[in-house]
Image (cartoon, coloured by chain):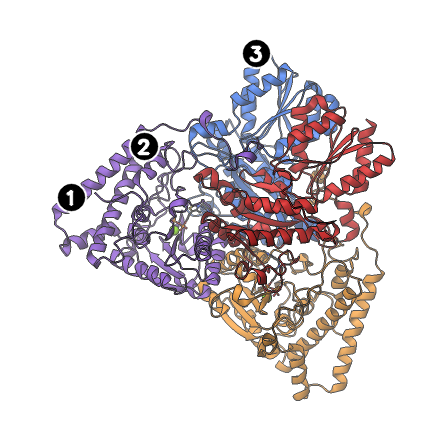
Chain colours: A purple, B orange, C blue, D red
Amino acid sequence: MLQTAPRRKKSTASRAAPHERFLEAFRWMLLARTLEDKLVSLYRGGLITGGVYVGRGQEAVSVACGLFLQKGDIFAPLIRDQAGRSAFGEPLVDVTRTYLGSRQGPMRGRDGNIHRGRPRDNQLAMISHLGAMVSVTVGVLLAKRFKREKNFVGLSCIGEGGMQTGSFHEGMNLAAVEQVPLVVVATNNHYAYSTPNDREFACHDLVDRAIGYGFEGYTIDGNDLTNCLDVIGGAVKRARAGRPPQLVVASILRLSGHGEHDDASYVTDEMKRQPFARDCLKVAEQMIVDLNLVDPETLREWREDAAAQVDQAIATAQKEAAPEADQEDWCAVSTRRIADQIE
Amino acid sequence: MLQTAPRRKKSTASRAAPHERFLEAFRWMLLARTLEDKLVSLYRGGLITGGVYVGRGQEAVSVACGLFLQKGDIFAPLIRDQAGRSAFGEPLVDVTRTYLGSRQGPMRGRDGNIHRGRPRDNQLAMISHLGAMVSVTVGVLLAKRFKREKNFVGLSCIGEGGMQTGSFHEGMNLAAVEQVPLVVVATNNHYAYSTPNDREFACHDLVDRAIGYGFEGYTIDGNDLTNCLDVIGGAVKRARAGRPPQLVVASILRLSGHGEHDDASYVTDEMKRQPFARDCLKVAEQMIVDLNLVDPETLREWREDAAAQVDQAIATAQKEAAPEADQEDWCAVSTRRIADQIE
Amino acid sequence: MSITYLEAIREAQAKLLRDDERVFIYGEDVGGTFGGAFKATKGLAKEFPGRVLNTPISEDAMVGAAIGAALEGMRPIVEMQFADFSSTALNQILNNAGTHYWRTNVPVPITVRLPCGGTKGSGPFHSQSMESIYAHYPGLIVMTPATVEDAYTMLIEAVTIDDPVVYCEHKYLYYHLKADKLPTEGGLPTGRARIAREGRDLTIVAYSAMLHEGLAVADELAREGFETEVVDLRTVKPLDTETILASVARTGRLLCVGESFPWGGATAEVISRVTSEGFHLLDAAPQRVNAKDTPIPYHPNLWAAHRPNAKTIADKARTLLRE
Amino acid sequence: MSITYLEAIREAQAKLLRDDERVFIYGEDVGGTFGGAFKATKGLAKEFPGRVLNTPISEDAMVGAAIGAALEGMRPIVEMQFADFSSTALNQILNNAGTHYWRTNVPVPITVRLPCGGTKGSGPFHSQSMESIYAHYPGLIVMTPATVEDAYTMLIEAVTIDDPVVYCEHKYLYYHLKADKLPTEGGLPTGRARIAREGRDLTIVAYSAMLHEGLAVADELAREGFETEVVDLRTVKPLDTETILASVARTGRLLCVGESFPWGGATAEVISRVTSEGFHLLDAAPQRVNAKDTPIPYHPNLWAAHRPNAKTIADKARTLLRE
Ligand SMILES: Cc1ncc(C[n+]2csc(CCOP(=O)(O)OP(=O)(O)O)c2C)c(N)n1
Ligand SMILES: Cc1ncc(C[n+]2csc(CCOP(=O)(O)OP(=O)(O)O)c2C)c(N)n1
Ligand SMILES: [Mg+2]
Ligand SMILES: [Mg+2]
């Protein structure tokens, strides 16, 4: 069974032989897909309140974001990053507890779905306002430099929609000014909610933003796990080695609604026929089969293993109590003495 | 005497022979410098409350911003754009009335110094928050398109410091998405207040931002009036002709404090020795002398004429009454019926 | 036939687009076949080609552009996807739109629609009520319609008014609130509150979704023998002090209910005005009920306790009536 | 020897940098030889190399970065060049710093310094007081020091506290206010108001620069035979209702003065609390004086009338005393 507890030791991924790394990544992708499929069915069954946001089709990019980070590195995932979160070390129960509103989850029912995180374990808890987490990641890296830590990087995710926020711009520029070891992975999944690229930006290629900030820029085909691992792995390595901040722009199609409430009927058929519209998980699996990297039996076991882990995480969360208003500490500041003065 | 009332007819500049255009520009520069020198001495003499912000050293860039705009075009100047404002048609008394707090100025004592404008005459009144006026300019252009106007452009000014605001980024991107005929002229005067370029941005050249927005980008030497006129004139022409939005980045040194309260002691000697640190007005005058474009007598007359206009504008404003609190309409909304309900 | 609060907002926009060519709609996902996160502009892009436009995720720029367009004679309606995201447009709203008329004598007729307020499971960033922040600054009119009729007529008036309007529409009311039909005439003028229910023992002042909690409490108290007058503010700025004072003059008791955070804001403003201007009218200490002073929780159990509700309001009302 | 309010702020920062290696200062023009638009960090960059850092003009990012650094164990102080520009950082302050502890159980110890308030000729964008906006939202502590001593001890406490603090320093007090020396011990705890002057006829509640207008009025009224108690709030959030109520219990009359805009805000909150919790203590209608409901005017003639001043406050006080 794959280790899903927060990893406190160095990931093997960065040093592993390419095909081992590929297979490890594939398993995280499979786990994320299995989990999210299950969350979707719980949502459809009325068992999840609020929204469900999944990363279907974006697992290859996302897993590469989580996989190369080591102890001491900082990760700022966004809404389509289940694969990366898991690879980074987020326990599955964190996800199910948050979605199912268990009092024992990291957000304790106070926040839901994808706004979760464990800042103490270097996984930032995103706010909804897109773009805002880039500068926060920069700040963590600044602090690490102040504290004379060595060998650290930060990785912050964004969608092509979020790249148009002012907050994103300021964060990117600040990263370059401070020359912190930051990797920004931008996934152009061709829509921001229902809005297609032509109403989002008008440059030829979003990677052309890199030069204007003083970042190094790379593009990847988000369908192709090998490509994702190579390029994002390379970017992480370069940032760690002291190169300027790195921007990686991936191209992909979101293979779900914006959230599960959304039928995505605005996605055109033409769009669905584009090469970037393939399912990266299927592509990766096909490659495993074609190259005979593992036998079908093993693949089947992995699948079962993922399902078992997901079932267990859900069962655990479902057994747990919901938060109750009268047991809640209704206080937004931590300083007890001051808290007591705020009614 | 130069026409300083708002020009409602087509400027001659765009069609004039190069050296006539140069001379017209020079005269506006001279007027701006003369005016601002005078404002500075009034400020030093304690006759102006608040701050005085001048465009010393930036007149060549600025004048080119105002000079090619025609009736129906829209201008969003910033704090160092006296030359451009005058060339666009701002009457000198607007300036002196605002600085001297006359009740008859366009801001009627409600706002001061460089935050003035006449939106009805297509000269936007900047707010202090840098970057904010780019999207406003985009909006005016959008409206003109809605109204099926033809042949219009907008020009919005920014400093290299203001380019780092989120607001600027959003405005630029929106301009490109909407494909409005916008020219953005960014003046890198090497400082944002006391902050040198290396703490402002880390890209090699700010013009490299153009491609990331889908703008066309150009650079100019802000000392060289001919270059300013050619490139900004060209950008205005291209925008008017339906090319994508245009970004022009000028290089120059601010030859004053940030405001007149600031002695700019942080400007290094090395900086003052850079080629971009020359005084564009002197360079232009030298060229007039060298090429014998006008005789020394004419130059002297122009100088006297500028001084006379400035003196008159100041004398006018000084004679006028200040606003009085008890005659003021203390109401921030225009709808009378509603205003009466807001105490 | 019946029409919801949300449909009224859509119909008002359809009418505005139909009747006034200066009107256009600008915001994230408002256009295309989609029609907005809440479908408040559903079908409008098709019916009015080129006038219902998707924007990039750039709240500051979309408001900036609306300001520019308004200066040039248009009547833009900006839809924020959620009120909460208007925090990133706040500078343009407060410092640009809000100051413009005062500074230049040229008004800025923009309408910014804010889908406000809490719904179950929406959490800290999709539930906020921001009227108190916008009302604090000068230069803005802040509408908080509580009925289907007002949602309709006030949105039309918002776009008609020459000044910038922040129009706070409540997401909980979108589907929950229905009327038989849309009004064919304008409603009360902007800035006038409405007596939603008459009574003589207690005045409850409320607005937006809290009006309905207030009305429910009035029903409940009626069964206990108390007659509660309920005032619907309709706009929190301007605030109709006169109508409130007249009500308090009748009842002698004031309870003010708002869904936003407890420090400052609309309820504090109402109580301040009433006590400053109508102190002698009060027979008991005026009270208020607000949300709790924490971010708005995601979990329904917590959310239900965070916002004022019929129970917490009724409890407070009973204490007040006993005094 | 004497020390100004501004010097106290500088000295507090010097001490913090000296005593705590987690502290750094971040903001526009704070570093180099310059030391900030108001010189509040003058000399500190040289004395503490690498710890007083200029930022690009990016208020959102500078607060975002401070949040990140705080999560990683630092104690950043962010200087806004003027409070007014914090509108572009408001989202990070309210929605990121303000919600973080509630959401994740991890507090965010940042201090955001806001040079607030009006000075002659500064106009609409360099004069604002924003305490009421920050106090409205949960999760923030909002300090408004009115004395040199408080400027010093409260800034030190702000940085020491684990929660985000919005520290509103008043630009008018920078040079106008002087003390003999800096305190060697801490002041009153955060959240505790101070009786700045004792009296028994009237309570004036004020904070920041308005404290001094309040004290001037108290002097004036003393000559007319009235004894005015003046309460300095020190922090507008938390608000020390207890101290205010105790004062009103002594005087029976309440006048609340604030420099920010009149709708909502600190004065409304004070009056609401006093009337809700201490209605029976009041012998007359509580009153307030705020700035006018327009942007802050540039011209000194207009500015002087826009803000509350000793004359307008005294007028209101006299009316109140006559009731
Ligand atoms: C500042 C801001 N405005 C609006 C939203 C509402 N919103 C949430 S997700 C989303 C679309 C995001 O698109 P993109 O960044 O491309 O990410 P994707 O959903 O495609 O992964 C929008 C508009 C937001 N979260 N933040
Ligand atoms: C959003 C914002 N933050 C801070 C300021 C304060 N401020 C006014 S001018 C200035 C420097 C501007 O530098 P730049 O854009 O390069 O223009 P320059 O003064 O050099 O012409 C600053 C920081 C501001 N006006 N707006
Ligand atoms: Mg996208
Ligand atoms: Mg500059």
Residue drawn at 63 percent across, 49 percent down: C108
Marks 3 and 2, how far apart at CA: 43 Å
Left or right side of C274 for D14: left
Q: Which residue is mark 3?
A: C224
Left or right side of C68 for B259: right
Of the residues shown, which amino acid type is indicated by label 2? Answer: Ala
Rendering quarter of residue C215: top right
- What percent of the width, then of the height, locates residue D218? 80, 37
Image quarter of the C terminus of chain B = top right
Of the residues shown, which amino acid type is indicated by label 3? Answer: Glu
For marks 1 and 2, give the one nearer the viewer: 2
- What percent of the width, then of the height, locates residue A101? 37, 32
- What percent of the width, then of the height, locates residue A201? 44, 57
Badge 3: few (under 14), some or many (20 or more) residues near its Cα, within 10 Å? few
**C271 or B76: which is nearer to us?**
C271
Rendering quarter of residue C148: top right
Examine the rendering and report whether any part of residue A61 can be seen.
yes
Q: Which residue is mark 2?
A: A317
Image quarter of the N terminus of chain B = bottom right
- Name the subunit of mark 3: C
Residue drawn at 75 percent across, 83 percent down: B298
Residue drawn at 58 percent across, 53 percent down: C69
For marks 3 and 2, give the one nearer the viewer: 2
Q: Is residue A185 above or below residue C242?
A: below
Q: Which residue is mark 1?
A: A300
Of the residues shown, which amino acid type is indicated by label 1? Answer: Arg
The lab-note entry on whether marks 1 and 2 share a chain reads yes
For marks 1 and 3, give the one nearer the viewer: 1
Marks 1 and 2, how far apart at CA: 26 Å
- Name the subunit of mark 2: A
Q: Is residue B76 above or below residue B296?
A: above
